[in-house]
Image (spheres, rainbow, N blue to C red):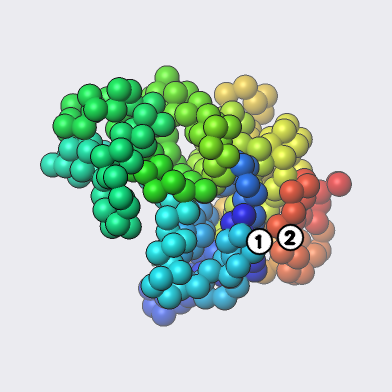
């Protein structure tokens, strides 16, 4: 449905150094599929998400939607923007405090010149679980709970009848009970409307509860991906193992050494090797620090980019 192929996105950083925020990514989100993109802060998740939305232009590689390469001309991009919608975390930040719920949800339909605005808004609110929708029309964000505000943001996306939602940390700012509510809403939207979603998150628990597939990103690359159960129950990449080891139920925590990753200085060989706990334990191979790893293809089966993985 939505696919990134050999995607690179670079920014010019301080001192003229290039920051390779996305540095060779193949990733697909199938129809009706929920894919979680996980990885620590700064690994390029938001940049990848924004590029998938057509908000950022790739330095090289491409985005395709329904098999057609994304065109960055006005008209094609407008049509694409209806079908692939962004849902932001932090609903207080993404809602204008002076706009009513109605205004917030009507904004997209107005920009796209949709007929029957009021019916579209009511329908979107109802689908996002705000019922009866008319009761919410004249409310302001500060009069709503955190969960309701997140539902308004989701309704704003649903008003355009999208096929794919890209949710950047959709529940990071919410408490646990609200988080559960929003997760079940996303799952219901998938079941009822066949929506696909890419859910960008730090939260592996969230990935476990919602995603069909998980892609683990490290320093601009997908280092491991596959069905959620495979990746989270039987992680092959040392980085995925380290991420999972911080969960409360994990027996022993793996502490990564070394500098936090910097996209202007991507290490040679495996980009994770300077922080790898296996390399630190003397279990590395010479190629870990010398040979560039292959970029993983956009497959759905479990796969890992690591010289030390046993499968
Ligand atoms: N517009 C930009 N100009 C320059 N550098 C950027 C820009 N956007 C992102 N970067 C850099 O690209 C890298 C990846 O950033 P990105 O926001 O994609 O990470 P992230 O995984 O979403 O992090 P977080 O989990 O904190 O949201 C970072 O080093 C960031 O500083
Ligand atoms: Mg981000």
- Residue ID at (86%, 46%): 310
- Residue at disc 1, CB closer than 8 Å to ligand 1: no
Q: In the orientation shown, which residue stands out farthest toward the front?
A: 116
Q: In the orientation shown, which residue stands out farthest toward the bottom?
A: 16
Vertical placement of residue 140 versus 13, above or below: above
Q: Residues within 10 Å of mark 1 (few under 14, many from 20)?
A: many
Q: Are marks 1 and 2 in contact (CB under 8 Å)?
A: yes
Would you say 37 lies left or right of 142 here? right
Measured from the top left, where is residue 269 in percent x and y?
A: 71, 66
Which label was assigned to residue 219? none
Question: Is the N terminus in the top left, top right, bottom left or bottom right quadrant?
Answer: bottom right
Instruction: Please tell me which residue lies in front, 7 or 311.
Output: 7
Would you say 101 lies left or right of 288 here? left
Q: In the orientation shown, which residue stands out farthest toward the top?
A: 177
Q: Residues within 10 Å of mark 2 (few under 14, many from 20)?
A: some
Would you say 57 lies left or right of 297 here? left
Measured from the top left, where is residue 47 in percent x and y?
A: 47, 60
Could one spot residue 127 in this view of the protein?
A: yes
Measured from the top left, where is residue 211 in percent x and y?
A: 61, 36
Element type at marker 1? strand
Would you say 155 lies left or right of 283 here? left
Vertical placement of residue 179 versus 45, above or below: above
Instruction: Please tell me which residue lies in front, 186 or 251.
Output: 186
- Residue ID at (30%, 22%): 132
Q: In the orientation shown, which residue stands out farthest toward the right?
A: 311
Vertical placement of residue 25 versus 236, above or below: below
- Residue ID at (24%, 27%): 134
- Residue ID at (57%, 66%): 63
Check disc 1 and report the residue beneath it.
Answer: 26
Q: Earlier in the sequence, mark 1 or mark 2?
A: 1
Check disc 2 and report the residue beneath it.
Answer: 297
């Amino acid at each position: 449905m939505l696919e990134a192929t050999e995607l690179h996105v670079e920014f010019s950083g301080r001192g003229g150094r290039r920051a390779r925020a996305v540095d060779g990514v193949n990733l697909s989100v199938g129809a009706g599929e929920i894919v979680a993109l996980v990885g620590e802060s700064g690994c390029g998740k938001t940049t990848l998400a924004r590029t998938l939305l057509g908000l950022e232009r790739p330095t090289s590689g491409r985005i395709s939607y329904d098999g057609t390469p994304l065109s960055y001309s006005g008209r094609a991009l407008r049509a694409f923007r209806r079908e692939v919608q962004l849902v932001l975390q932090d609903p207080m930040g993404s809602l204008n405090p002076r706009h009513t719920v109605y205004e917030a949800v009507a904004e997209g339909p107005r920009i796209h010149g949709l007929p029957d605005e009021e019916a579209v808004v009511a329908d979107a609110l109802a689908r996002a679980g705000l019922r009866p929708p008319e009761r919410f029309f004249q409310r302001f964000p500060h009069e709503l709970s955190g969960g309701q505000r997140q539902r308004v943001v989701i309704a704003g996306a649903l008003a355009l009848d999208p096929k794919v939602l890209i949710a950047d940390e959709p529940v990071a700012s919410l408490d646990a009970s609200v988080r559960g509510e929003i997760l079940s809403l996303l799952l219901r939207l998938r079941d009822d409307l066949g929506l696909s979603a890419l859910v960008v998150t730090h939260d592996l628990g969230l990935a476990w509860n919602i995603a069909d597939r998980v892609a683990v990103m490290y320093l601009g690359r997908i280092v491991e991906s596959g069905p959620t159960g495979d990746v989270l129950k039987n992680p092959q990449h040392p980085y995925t193992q380290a991420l999972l080891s911080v969960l409360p139920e994990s027996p022993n925590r793996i502490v990564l050494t070394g500098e936090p990753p910097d996209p202007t200085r991507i290490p040679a060989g495996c980009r994770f090797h300077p922080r790898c706990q296996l390399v630190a334990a003397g279990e590395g191979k010479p190629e870990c620090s010398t040979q560039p790893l292959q970029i993983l293809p956009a497959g759905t089966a479990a796969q890992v980019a690591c010289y030390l993985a046993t499968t």
